[in-house]
Image (spheres, rainbow, N blue to C red):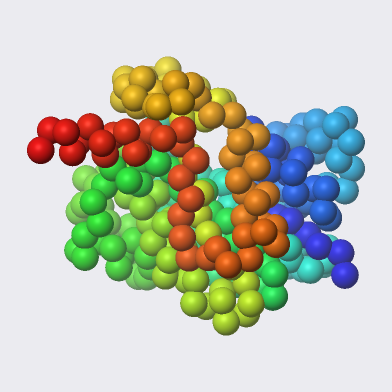
């Protein structure tokens, strides 16, 4: 049976790079909130020789639309992977909306696609190196791992103060915690679930953040490799995680950040 690879945020730089990699193995289903951008992405991929591409407009915070996306994927073939790149960065919305998209949206995607998972299926969720800036704490760990719980957005507001920067960091830690929390459920079906935490990546979204954030420049200045990453470097990590060579990797996060977090942690130790 033909494999289908679903990529949320599929019209973005990272989503298209992942599609180019995974599209060699089956059908790609791109999902995003903007239909015009999806059409342009599909056309761009077709120009590069990737023609087995479908797309669907989806608001990942709308449970019905997410369910319809899963139904569309099931009609296309056997689920090879769900790669969840869709999300909002700090300059794109207020804190509550960032938590809704990045946390609740991730929860809805994983809930909808778990029933489609089978032996060999992989779920890859994109987190961020910023998740490592926040210490884990029992006061909010359980909450972040379960964003579909009642009153989640109201409860987490107490920790973020609805500030966009804080909400973003909390939401990305939540992605890592969800992956850890759900590894057992996915594993019972012979499937794997992992997260990837990119550093400063050369994409339109990252460039928008860098233009408005002094912290982004500071992090880049402290990156051992001395440069931004490229979208295809994230795509290569995702392709590896979706392949047989990663068959015993699940329930964990992979940092692809040029060593930024390692150096930040090193500098913090030197101050002790």
- Residue at the left extreme, as displayed: 272
Query: Quadrant location of the C terminus?
Result: top left
| Up-down relation of residue 169 to residue 232 (above or below) | below
What x and y, as percent, mark residue 78? 79, 68
Residue 265 appears in the figure: yes
Left or right of 176? Residue 16 is: right
- Position of residue 8 measured from the top left corner of the image (x, y, whole percent): 63, 49
Which residue corresponds to the image point at 55% horizontal and 70% vertical from the top-left? 111
Q: Quadrant of residue 129?
A: top left
Q: Residue at x 46, y 45 (%)?
A: 255
Tell me: 233 left or right of 216.
right
Given the current orientation, which residue lies at the most extreme bottom position? 188
Q: Pinpoint residue 155: horizontal percent, then vertical percent.
A: 25, 60
Please name the residue shown 67% across and 59% down the image.
245
Q: Nearer the viewer, residue 36 or 176?
A: 176
> What is the residue that sits farthest to the top in this orientation?
211
**Residue 43 in view of the camera:** no
Taking depth in this image into account, of 11 and 245 the one nearest to the observer is: 245
Give residue 180's position: percent from left, percent from top: 43, 66
**Does residue 128 sit above or below 215 in this rendering?**
below
Q: Residue at x 12, y 33 (%)?
A: 271
- Of 211 and 130, which appears nearest the observer? 130
Quick one: quadrant of the N terminus?
A: bottom right
């Amino acid at each position: 049976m033909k494999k289908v690879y679903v990529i949320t945020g599929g019209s973005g730089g990272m989503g298209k790079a992942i599609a180019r990699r995974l599209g060699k193995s089956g059908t790609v289903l791109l999902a995003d909130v903007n239909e015009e951008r999806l059409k342009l992405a599909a056309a761009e991929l077709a120009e590069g020789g990737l023609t087995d591409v479908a797309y669907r407009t989806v608001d990942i915070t709308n449970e019905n639309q997410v369910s319809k996306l899963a139904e569309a994927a099931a009609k296309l073939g056997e689920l090879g992977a769900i790669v969840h790149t869709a999300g909002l960065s700090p300059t794109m919305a207020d804190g509550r909306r960032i938590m809704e998209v990045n946390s609740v949206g991730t929860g809805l995607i994983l809930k909808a696609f778990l029933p489609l998972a089978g032996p060999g299926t992989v779920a890859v969720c994109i987190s961020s190196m910023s998740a490592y800036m926040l210490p884990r704490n029992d006061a909010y760990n359980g909450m972040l791992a379960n964003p579909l719980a009642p009153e989640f957005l109201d409860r987490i507001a107490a920790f973020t103060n609805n500030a966009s920067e804080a909400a973003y960091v909390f939401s990305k830690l939540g992605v890592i915690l969800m992956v850890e929390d759900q590894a057992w459920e996915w594993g019972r079906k012979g499937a794997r679930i992992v997260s990837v935490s990119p550093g400063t990546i050369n994409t339109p979204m990252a460039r928008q953040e860098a233009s408005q954030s002094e912290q982004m420049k500071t992090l880049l200045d402290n990156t051992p490799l001395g440069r931004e990453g490229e979208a295809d470097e994230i795509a290569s990590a995702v392709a590896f995680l979706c392949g047989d060579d990663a068959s015993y990797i699940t329930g964990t996060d992979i940092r692809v950040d040029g060593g930024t977090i390692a150096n930040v942690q090193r500098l913090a130790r030197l101050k002790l």
